[in-house]
């Protein structure tokens, strides 16, 4: 990959660059201190302290106690572990899971699987801005509910959801509350010790730790049944040899995220807003997807109407610009994402949705390049789009 042209990476909700500081801290644990943290001998056993240091850093980052942190392999594992545990520990008459229509597949597809196993899964709808219908939430969360799981921040739109109000509804009904905070962690400030959340999952690779490490927070006093069963690691709550290098990497990434939280998020927000405003000004028929008043500082989702997002992505790729569309390439047809469909985004806009997501490693030059290049790309694609021609003819 070395020597290739400059990459303008605006796909940080998909994954982030591992912070160089995290990489440097991890390296000795691959080749020098490669022992097993659960060993009796000193060579391995002393790594238990390193694991606990990593845990303390992640706990500090989340505003939790270290004993409330379980290391996992990824966000998906945390999501699965939390819901399955909640179903196991609750009274058997509670067979209902309440989620939202805009969850990540880590929750949505688990929900489908649970339905096949006889559980009831209900989804709280959202409006055209992707805001949760809290009246429906109140109706849905009841005495039969085992667990409510609603994401803190949406990966496609960046929308933020009222997790504390939802936790309150869950608790009133005697249910547990879990949130998928994979996109929220490191991007919005919170301290779990001051909140009413029972379980929360995060993923290292969304905040500059490597891929393959995550954490599940389980509030002290909340019963938990392990998802990965085997050895006694993680105090019997998650089996499998501790991934010492990645735990070290996640600890450093968590420290970095905390150290410059305000400055970095303001910096990222400024870049995001600049791109957002200049693209809307420069390109006709752009629709904003999501709730701009309540969203992550690093994300914007724009639909370039009457053309395909995939086509836009491919043209941007030629210029080294990386972003995402919400579409899932299923069975050969490009379906708009479930998030766009849940929001009722019109067909002609849902197909042209592009998500731009920033991190601390982006620069003003990145924004300037996209603003320079994208209007021409959109014009070129629209010139051969029958939908655009039709729209222009009817205007
Ligand atoms: N939840 C959300 C909201 C996400 O955005 C993602 C990843 O994109 C996940 C869960 C899954 O995380 P992981 O890739 O660590 O399994």
Image (spheres, helix red, strand yellow):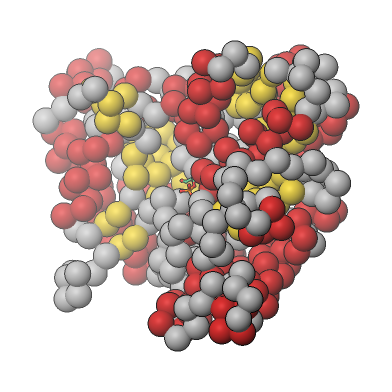
Write the residue at 44% across / 26% down: 338
As drawn, the residue found furthest toward the left would be 384
Q: Position of residue 157 (x, y in %)?
A: 50, 40
Label count reads 0
The quarter holding residue 142 reads top right
Q: Quadrant of the N terminus?
A: bottom left
Q: Please state if 297 lies on the left or on the right of 226 as rendered.
A: left
Give above or below for 47 relative to 342.
below
Give above or below for 171 relative to 160.
above
Query: Is residue 125 or residue 222 the one in the foreground?
Result: 222
Q: Position of residue 103 (x, y in %)?
A: 54, 32
Q: Please state if 286 lies on the left or on the right of 139 as rendered.
A: left
Query: Is residue 355 or residue 22 the one in the foreground?
Result: 22
Q: Please state if 275 lies on the left or on the right of 306 as rendered.
A: right
As drawn, the residue found furthest toward the front would be 40
| Residue 205 visible in the current orientation | yes
Q: In which quarter of the image is the C terminus?
A: top left
Q: Position of residue 293 (x, y in %)?
A: 62, 42
Q: Position of residue 390 (x, y in %)?
A: 20, 18
Write the residue at 65% across / 44% down: 226
Write the residue at 50% across / 83% down: 33
| Residue 153 visible in the current orientation | no
Write the residue at 70% across / 28% down: 87
């Amino acid at each position: 990959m070395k020597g290739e042209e400059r990459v303008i990476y605006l796909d940080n909700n998909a994954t982030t660059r591992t912070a160089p500081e995290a990489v440097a801290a991890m390296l000795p644990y691959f080749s020098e201190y490669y022992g097993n943290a659960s060993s009796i001998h000193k060579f391995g056993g002393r790594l238990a302290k390193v694991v606990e240091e990593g845990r303390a850093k992640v706990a500090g980052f989340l505003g939790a106690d270290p004993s409330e942190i379980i290391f996992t392999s990824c966000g998906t594992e945390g999501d699965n572990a939390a819901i399955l545990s909640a179903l196991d520990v609750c009274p058997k008459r509670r067979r209902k899971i309440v989620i939202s229509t805009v969850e990540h597949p880590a929750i949505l597809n688990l929900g489908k699987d649970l339905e096949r196993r006889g559980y009831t899964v209900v989804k709280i709808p959202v409006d055209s801005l992707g805001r949760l219908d809290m009246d429906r939430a109140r109706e849905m969360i009841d005495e039969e509910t085992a667990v409510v799981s609603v994401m803190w921040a949406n990966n496609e739109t960046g929308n933020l959801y009222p997790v504390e109000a939802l936790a309150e509804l869950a608790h009133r009904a005697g249910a547990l509350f879990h949130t998928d905070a994979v996109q929220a962690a490191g991007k919005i400030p919170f301290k779990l010790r001051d909140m009413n959340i029972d379980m929360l999952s995060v993923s290292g690779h969304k905040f500059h730790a490597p891929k393959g490490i995550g954490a599940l927070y389980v509030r002290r006093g909340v019963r938990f049944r392990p998802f990965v069963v085997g050895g006694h690691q993680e105090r019997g709550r998650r089996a499998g040899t501790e991934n010492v290098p990645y735990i070290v990497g996640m600890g450093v990434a968590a420290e970095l995220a905390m150290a410059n939280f305000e400055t970095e998020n303001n910096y990222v927000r400024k870049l995001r807003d600049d791109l957002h405003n200049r693209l809307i000004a420069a390109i006709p028929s752009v629709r904003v997807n999501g709730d701009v008043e309540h969203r992550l500082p690093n994300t914007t989702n724009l639909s370039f109407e009457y053309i395909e997002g995939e086509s836009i992505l491919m043209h941007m790729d030629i210029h080294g610009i990386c972003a995402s569309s919400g579409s899932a390439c299923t069975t050969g047809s490009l379906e708009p994402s479930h998030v766009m469909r849940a929001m009722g985004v019109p067909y002609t806009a849902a197909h042209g949705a592009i998500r731009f997501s920033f991190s601390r490693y982006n620069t003003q030059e990145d924004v300037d390049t996209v603003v320079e290049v994208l209007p021409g790309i959109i014009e070129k694609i629209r010139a051969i789009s029958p939908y655009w021609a039709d729209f222009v003819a009817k205007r």
